[in-house]
Image (spheres, rainbow, N blue to C red):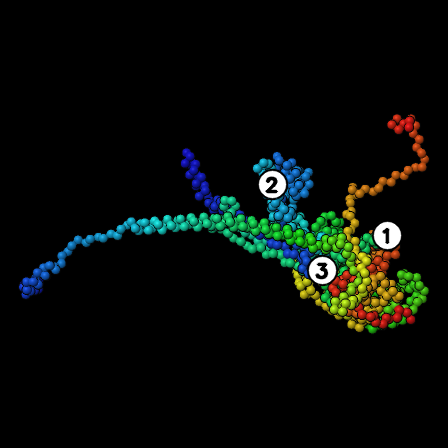
């Protein structure tokens, strides 16, 4: 019993036979091709290093920002306090008592009546009388009441009309 | 051996309650800050601040660090903060203490400057290292005594619970106390982790609860007019040698109170220097008998009932003998013929009683209640007295006679101003108000112009006739109070001179009795033909000779009313109409 391969070899011409011989497949050992490790390790290391450096930079920047924020908050507090102080001073200047004192010093008094001047007609209307100061109240009140210890009742000493005769006095007045 | 100790410590830290140690570690690096709510401001009707809150500091010393250098530190603080040297020296040397207040409520800028100056010296003198500051807000009252009795004041918390809760203030009296909850707001809190240099960790835990600031309150007070009324009142009280005085300006149509002036009063910036009784609003807290000003209400009620007219003829004897005691007038006279208008113009008690005899049972009392007497006016301040109107068996015939001319009943000044304002407002009573808009008191009561009500008490015609009768009171010929006139304006008003109730001992028992002093008052409105303001002035217990409603309170009324009318540019009055006859 002949195999099909032998039959084919027998039937093929010589050049073809040679070609078939060349093309015969044989089992060869598998070759393992490994990629180079170095670039990958380098890449990963660079990424890690970059990440760490970036994180450090980020953290440093955040810390710096935190310091700056603290300083700015302090400055904002200082400025707010300054603004409030100025606000207080402005309020003190607007105090009616303060304004009245300034007005009084400038010779101003409260009017007795209202008088309107019509600028167009140069006419006055209303009760036009000169301000006299009668309606201007005293700006300062009485002083504070002192406690009895600071404001003792006056000691009244009744002096008798009879002259006091000193006899045999021993002080410096004696003999005068 | 050493490693065993370390191992044991490790087991203790990690095995025994590690959570607690973690929490302790976290707490050591965590800071909690209270974010203070700003206390609401109190404004006058034009937005001028009457009470304001600003940032402040408490300067604190740690005696453990300052004791050794106390003289130098005390001298520095006395110079920079104006504190007493001896007291400060003692505080800097307190044994066993690490916390002593040196100065409180110091303006933040000043406190920071002082602390910076102290730090600069701390290299040379260690004691300066024992100074630090703490937040301590300042409540300021820019106008000092102006409206102080209305505002009240705030002080240090005195109750232990308030101190532990970290409350900044305790309110005493006035709007500060009545609206304390609304003004206070709610403090917030910030919690964060911190690192070196006290800076917060950027990625640490950070929680913030924002504070809710207190509500601002806008009053109806006119600060400048209030100032003028207070100064004028002070001058009058001192001049009359009176015990106290009250002056009220009320907007006729809206019922807004432009001034509630009291004297003696106090400086809200320095309340401790005043007597406690001078820190209250007498205009609401003091009950007294109104006297003849009340006759206006009696007359208006009679006219409204149609029982009389301004021309009703009355025969007025020199003395009216009633059940328990004779009734007299303030001047000696025989039998005179007065019209009802004349009775009011001359302020005749006898004529008023004779006219009031026409009331049916309970009618006058009903009118007085409608005018607002015997009930709190509800302007918003605490401690308001209701006054009293006798009722039931207490309203005897004799009492009814006296009530008709303003004795045997008691009122507060705001009640009386609102009652007279009813006549000015055409017979419609409008609730007096002190708050613009609306605000809620701590007890939940809503007050203010948005919730005020009106009610008709007498007819418009009765109010008009009463007004014309009141104009006679300031008439130089027919009236008793020409000094209450305001140049350029027609005034309708009424005087009052009432006996005051004091305490006396009868048969060893203390009881109320007339003590010989009087309340002099004047209530009126202007311009009479179209009223803009109602002004009420009352002085308690004047001791100068000749003190009376017309002579003593009338000029005060004139000045305050004149100032109010000019300030609000009220046009002057036109020619007066025909007067009612006063005699027949």
**Is there CB contact under 8 Å for labels 3 and 1?**
no
Give the quadrant of the N terminus of chain B: top left
For disc 2, the marked residue is: B118
Disc 3 is placed on an element classified as: loop
Gap in angstroms between the C-alphas marked 2 and 3: 44 Å
The image position of residue B580, as x and y in percent, is: 86, 71
Which label's residue is closer to the chain start, 3 or 1? 3
Q: Distance between the residues labelled 3 and 1?
A: 45 Å
Identify the image quadrant of residue B90: top right
Q: Is residue B412 above or below residue A76?
A: below
User: From the viewer's perspective, is A59 left or right of B561?
Assistant: left
Secondary structure under badge 1?
Answer: strand
Callout in the foreground (2, 3): 2
Q: Please tell me which of labels 1 and 2 falls first in the chain.
A: 2
Residue B474: percent from the left, percent from the top? Answer: 85, 64
Circle on res. B221: 3
- Residue positioned 47% across, 48% down in the render: A63
Instruction: Please name the residue that numbered disc 1 is placed on.
Output: B506
Looking at the image, residue B24 sits to the left or right of residue B439; the answer is left
> From the viewer's perspective, is residue B122 above or below residue B216?
above
Residue at x-position 71% and y-position 60%: B221
Count neighbours of disc 3 (C-alpha within 10 A) and say few if under 14, some if 14 to 19, many if 20 or more. many
Helix, strand or loop at label 2? It is helix
* Mark before the other along the chain sequence, 2 or 3: 2
């Amino acid at each position: 019993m002949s195999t099909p391969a032998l039959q084919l070899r027998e039937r093929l011409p010589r050049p073809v036979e040679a070609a078939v011989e060349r093309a015969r497949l044989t089992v060869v050992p598998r070759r393992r091709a490994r990629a180079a490790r170095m670039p990958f390790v380098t890449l990963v290391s660079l990424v890690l290093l970059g990440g760490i450096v970036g994180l450090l930079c980020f953290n440093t920047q955040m810390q710096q920002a935190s310091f700056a924020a603290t300083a700015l908050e302090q400055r904002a507090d200082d400025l707010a306090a300054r603004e409030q102080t100025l606000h207080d001073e402005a309020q003190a200047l607007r105090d009616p008592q303060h304004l009245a004192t300034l007005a009084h010093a400038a010779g101003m008094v409260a009017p007795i009546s209202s008088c309107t001047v019509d600028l167009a007609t140069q006419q006055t209307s209303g009760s036009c009388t000169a301000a006299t100061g009668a309606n201007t109240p005293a700006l300062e009140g009485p002083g504070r009441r002192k406690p009895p210890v600071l404001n003792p009742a006056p000691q009244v000493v009744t002096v008798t009309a009879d002259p006091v005769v000193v006899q045999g006095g021993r002080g410096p007045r004696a003999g005068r | 051996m050493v490693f065993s100790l370390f191992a044991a410590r490790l087991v203790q830290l990690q095995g025994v309650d590690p959570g607690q140690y973690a929490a302790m570690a976290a707490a050591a690096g965590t800071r909690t800050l209270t974010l203070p709510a700003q206390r609401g401001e109190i404004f006058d009707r034009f937005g001028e601040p009457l009470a304001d809150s600003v940032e402040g500091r408490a300067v604190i010393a740690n005696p453990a660090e300052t004791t050794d250098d106390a003289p130098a530190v005390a001298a520095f603080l006395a110079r920079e903060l104006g504190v007493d040297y001896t007291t400060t020296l003692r505080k800097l040397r307190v044994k066993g203490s690490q916390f002593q207040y040196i100065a409180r409520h110091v303006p933040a800028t000043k406190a920071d400057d002082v602390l910076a100056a102290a730090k600069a010296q701390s290299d040379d003198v260690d004691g300066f290292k024992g100074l630090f500051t703490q937040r301590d807000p300042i409540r300021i009252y820019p106008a000092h005594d102006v409206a102080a009795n209305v505002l009240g004041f705030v002080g240090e918390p005195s109750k232990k619970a308030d101190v532990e809760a970290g409350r900044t203030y305790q309110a005493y009296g006035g709007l500060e106390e009545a609206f304390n909850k609304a003004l206070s707001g709610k403090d917030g809190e910030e919690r964060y982790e911190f690192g070196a240099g006290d800076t917060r960790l950027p990625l640490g835990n950070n929680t913030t609860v924002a504070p809710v600031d207190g509500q601002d309150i806008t009053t109806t007070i006119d600060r400048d007019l209030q100032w003028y009324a207070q100064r004028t009142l002070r001058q009058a009280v001192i001049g009359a040698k009176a015990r106290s005085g009250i002056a009220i300006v009320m907007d006729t149509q809206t019922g807004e109170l432009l001034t509630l002036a009291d004297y003696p009063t106090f400086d809200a910036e320095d309340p401790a220097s005043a007597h406690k009784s001078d820190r209250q609003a007498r205009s609401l807290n003091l009950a007294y008998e109104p006297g003849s000003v009340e006759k206006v209400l009696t007359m208006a009620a009679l006219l409204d009932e149609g029982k009389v007219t301004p021309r009703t003829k009355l025969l007025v004897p020199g003395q009216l003998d009633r059940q328990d005691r004779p009734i007299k007038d303030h001047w000696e006279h025989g039998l005179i013929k007065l019209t009802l208008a004349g009775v009011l113009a001359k302020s005749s008690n006898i004529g008023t009683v004779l006219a009031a005899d026409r009331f049916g049972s309970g009618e006058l009392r009903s009118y007085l209640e409608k005018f607002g007497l015997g009930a709190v006016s509800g302007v918003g301040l605490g401690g308001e007295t209701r006054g009293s109107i006798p009722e039931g068996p207490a309203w005897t015939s004799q009492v009814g006679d006296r009530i008709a001319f303003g004795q045997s009943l008691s009122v507060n000044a705001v009640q009386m101003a609102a009652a007279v304002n009813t006549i000015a407002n055409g017979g419609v009573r409008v609730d007096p108000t002190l708050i613009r808009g609306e605000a809620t008191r701590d007890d939940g009561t809503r007050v203010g112009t948005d919730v005020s009500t009106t009610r008709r008490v007498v007819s418009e015609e009765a109010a008009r006739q009463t007004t014309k009768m009141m104009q006679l009171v300031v008439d130089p010929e027919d009236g008793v109070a020409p000094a209450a006139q305001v140049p350029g304006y027609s005034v309708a008003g009424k005087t009052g001179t009432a006996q005051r109730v004091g305490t006396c001992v009868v048969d060893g028992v203390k009881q109320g009795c007339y003590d010989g002093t009087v309340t002099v008052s004047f209530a009126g409105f202007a311009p009479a033909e179209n009223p803009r303001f109602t002004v009420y002035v009352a002085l308690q217990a004047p001791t100068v000779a000749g003190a009376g409603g017309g002579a003593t309170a009338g000029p005060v009324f004139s000045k305050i009313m004149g100032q109010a009318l000019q300030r609000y540019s009220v046009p002057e009055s036109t020619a007066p109409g025909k007067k009612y006859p006063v005699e027949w």
